[in-house]
Amino acid sequence: MMRFAGALLLAVAAVPAARASEVSPIGKVVQLISDLQGKVIKEGEEAQKLYAEFSEWCEDRARELGHEIKTGTSEADSLKASIAESSASILELTTKIDDLASDIATDEADLKAATEIRDNEAADFKAEESELVETISMLDRATGILEREMAKGGASMMQVKNAQSLASALSAMVQASVMSSADAQRLTALVQTSNTAADTDAESDVGAPDAAVYESQSGNVVQTLHDMMEKAESQLDSARKTETKNLENFEMLKQSLSDEIKFANTDMAAAKS
């Protein structure tokens, strides 16, 4: 269009000067074309300016997007590495939690079993101690009565003194009314139990000496009762020492297991947090 407008201007320049002062239709057309040319040129300049600005914006934006893509890729790689590390940590902590849970369960089971054993030991000791204390008291009482009555003399006490077995002596003491039949029966049962244990070559469970000790040596019933009481006292002392040792061992084991459970629970809470 600009070339066309230029051609028209050249044509107008060829018109004689005499006719220049006349306003003809062609002149008007030329004027319109000239105005249009200026407008088009101006619009073209503005469009060129806008294009340059847009092109520059595109280049800037392209650089920004390139930087963002580069940064995003780097961040994605970093996040992937963090995810992989976190996954490894989760797996490690999960394994640790499972191990701690297993250790806690084992320690709790051990503590429960140890407590049951301790309860049984305590119950057995209490029964044994009660029986031995009662046996010692009965022997002491019988020995005191026998010594006192034998010091008095009398036909009935001669039978006791000359008795060749404890059972015979006890029977004579009951007949002489120096011992109750209940105590005599208990002492007789003690002798019988020990005789049975001796027959099976085993130790007595009631805190009395071997059966041979119960047989009166030259009729010395008092000495026999003393021997029985010493044996019972020795067994009571041994039972109490064993109980003390068992209790100390249990308390140490209980403290150790309780500490392990406590520390394991603390570690588990830390692993879960």
Image (spheres, grey):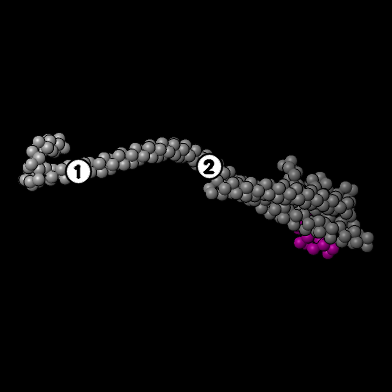
On the image, the x and y values in percent for residue 258 come to 64, 49
On the image, the x and y values in percent for residue 205 come to 73, 49
Q: Residue at x 8, y 47 (%)?
A: 23
Q: Taking 226 as reference, is 186 left or right?
A: left
Report crowding for label 2: few under 14, some 14 to 19, many 20 or more residues within 10 A (C-alpha): some
Classified by dominant secondary structure, the portion drawn in magenta counts as helix
Q: Which residues are magenta?
A: 174-187
Q: Amino acid at mark 2?
A: Leu
Q: Quadrant of the N terminus?
A: top left
Q: Residue furthest left?
A: 25
Residue at mark 2: 93
Q: Is residue 186 magenta?
A: yes
Element type at mark 2: helix
Tell me if residue 3 can be seen: yes
Residue 2, quarter of the rendered image:
top left
Q: Nearer the viewer, residue 28 or 89?
A: 28
Residue at mark 1: 38
Q: Residue at x 38, y 40 (%)?
A: 64
On the image, the x and y values in percent for residue 271 come to 55, 46
